[in-house]
Image (tube, rainbow, N blue to C red):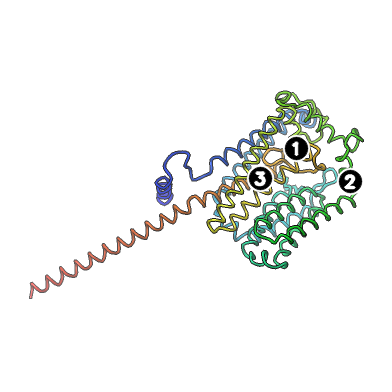
């Protein structure tokens, strides 16, 4: 550790105490994120064993891949944690261009799976472009709100501009097609604009237009309309359009209060499609019951609320970019969790969205972990901001003392020289 880092740590300990509970990092946030990832690894392992044995003749194949994704995600998080927030502040327009480039590349050379083109394959690496696109767009939106805050809050033109960018991304996402990601991004965008101080009539107008657009997209696409009708009454066709949802509801029903026990799910035995991915919460409910579901919901709720608290703290300390980015991450986690669990529980139409930090999926777990690392970095900079200011103040005081000491020594030397010359004469 460098002398500078040692000095800051010493100052931090002097200011806040030297106990482990006074770490410059939010240990609670780290523990909650790791808890969600650990629960995810356990449930994904349990849910994926039958399909993994069938497809790869190795029951732990998918679980091992998920474990590797978690390790990569943690390494990526440690790298991102070293990046100062000014990197995201100044690079967010370029990150947005990268997101648009990835979404265009997916449409041109992406891999098609079950009628959807969402994945870029680069050698052994598979990237779901929608995941980094969400993070990069939210970083851009936070930067835009800082650069054009008065325009956003005072006139319609400034309010519409970020929506034009969202519209471009939405068209590219719908071409895949991926309505679920568009809905989450739209909900997060209007939530962030509302928190930033947009006028209420603009907010409600945007909500109304967005709902009308979603309804239109559902009505004019036959497969989406089938999903909605099956969601309204899945038991009308339990072996057809309502099959996935009915199987998911049976998993929830079997779970009861405490579940059937870890590993004892029946629905994962190839009855429930995507059991380890989009419907992992149904398997968790079946094996760990109502208590397990509530535990995951409480952990996710705590993480989202902590993100909003960090955002509020950043705004109070006049760091608006960090504040808006933390807000967007908290809203993003909240809405995506609500959509995922709502779909598996029959509250919302089925959407192909992962459960943050829990579901199987390399791109999702990596990007969500990076987002959590950004929250940690924002909180870290807010914690050490006062310490760094104190360090600068101490250094300036030390420099002044040194200059005064040097001046006294020079004056003393001059007096000694004059005295010597006088005595010589």
* Sequence order check, earlier mark of 3 and 1: 1
* Residue 398 coordinates in the image, percent (x, y): 33, 58
Q: Is residue 217 left or right of residue 313?
A: right
Q: CA distance from mark 1 to mark 2?
A: 21 Å
- Residue marked by disc 1: 277
Q: Is residue 76 visible?
A: no
Q: Is residue 216 left or right of residue 355?
A: right
* Residue 361: mark: none
- Mark 2: few, some, or many residues within 10 Å (few <14, many ≥20)? few
* Sequence order check, earlier mark of 1 and 2: 2
SS type, badge 2 = helix
Nearer to us in this view, 51 or 200: 200
Q: Is residue 190 left or right of residue 421?
A: right
Nearer to us in this view, 311 or 26: 311
CB within 8 Å, label 3 to label 1? no
* Residue 368: mark: 3
> In which image quadrant can residue 337 be found?
top right
Q: How many marks?
A: 3
- Mark 1: few, some, or many residues within 10 Å (few <14, many ≥20)? many
Q: Is residue 127 above or below residue 167?
A: above
SS type, badge 1 = loop
Q: Is residue 353 above or below residue 266?
A: below
- Residue marked by disc 2: 223
Q: CA distance from mark 3 to mark 2?
A: 29 Å
* Residue 132 coordinates in the image, percent (x, y): 69, 51
Instruction: Please tell me which residue is depicted at 48% across the width and 39% down the height of the picture.
Output: 21
* Residue 42 coordinates in the image, percent (x, y): 67, 31
Instruction: Please tell me which residue is depicted at 89% across the width and 51% down the height of the picture.
Output: 219
Q: CA distance from mark 3 to mark 1?
A: 15 Å
């Amino acid at each position: 550790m460098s002398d500078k880092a040692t000095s800051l740590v010493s100052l931090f300990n002097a200011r806040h105490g030297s106990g482990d509970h006074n770490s410059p990092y939010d240990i609670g946030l780290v523990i909650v994120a790791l808890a969600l990832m650990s629960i995810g690894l356990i449930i994904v392992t349990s849910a994926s064993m039958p399909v993994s044995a069938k497809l790869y003749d190795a029951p732990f194949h998918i679980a091992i891949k998920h474990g590797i994704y978690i390790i990569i995600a943690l390494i990526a998080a440690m790298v991102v944690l070293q990046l100062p927030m000014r990197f995201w502040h100044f690079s967010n327009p370029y990150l947005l261009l990268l997101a648009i480039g990835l979404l265009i590349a997916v449409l041109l050379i992406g891999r098609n799976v079950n009628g959807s083109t969402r994945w870029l394959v680069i050698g052994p690496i598979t990237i779901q472009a929608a995941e980094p696109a969400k993070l990069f767009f939210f970083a851009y939106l936070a930067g835009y709100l800082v650069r054009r805050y008065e325009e956003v809050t005072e006139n319609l033109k400034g309010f519409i501009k970020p929506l034009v960018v969202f519209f471009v991304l939405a068209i590219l996402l719908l071409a895949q097609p991926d309505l679920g990601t568009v809905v989450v991004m739209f909900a997060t965008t209007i939530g962030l604009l509302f928190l930033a101080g947009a006028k209420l009539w603009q907010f409600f107008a945007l909500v109304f237009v967005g709902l009308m657009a979603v309804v239109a997209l559902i009505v004019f696409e036959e497969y989406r309309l089938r999903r909605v009708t099956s969601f309204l009454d899945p038991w009308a066709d339990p072996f057809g359009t309502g099959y996935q949802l009915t199987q998911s509801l049976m998993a929830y029903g079997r779970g009861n209060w405490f579940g059937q026990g870890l590993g004892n799910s029946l629905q994962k035995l190839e009855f429930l499609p995507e059991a380890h991915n989009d419907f992992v919460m149904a398997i968790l409910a079946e094996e760990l019951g109502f208590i397990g579901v509530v535990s995951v919901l409480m952990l996710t709720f705590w993480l989202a609320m902590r993100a909003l608290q960090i955002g509020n703290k950043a705004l109070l300390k006049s760091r608006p970019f960090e504040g808006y980015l933390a807000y967007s991450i908290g809203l993003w986690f909240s809405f995506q969790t609500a959509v995922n669990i709502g779909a598996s529980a029959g509250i919302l139409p089925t959407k192909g969205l992962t459960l943050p930090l829990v579901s199987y999926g390399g791109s999702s777990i990596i990007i969500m972990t990076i987002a959590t690392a950004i929250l940690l970095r924002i909180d870290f900079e807010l914690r050490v901001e006062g310490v760094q200011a104190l360090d600068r103040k101490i250094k300036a005081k030390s420099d002044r003392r040194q200059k005064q000491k040097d001046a006294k020594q020079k004056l003393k030397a001059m007096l000694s020289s004059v005295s010597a010359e006088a005595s010589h004469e």
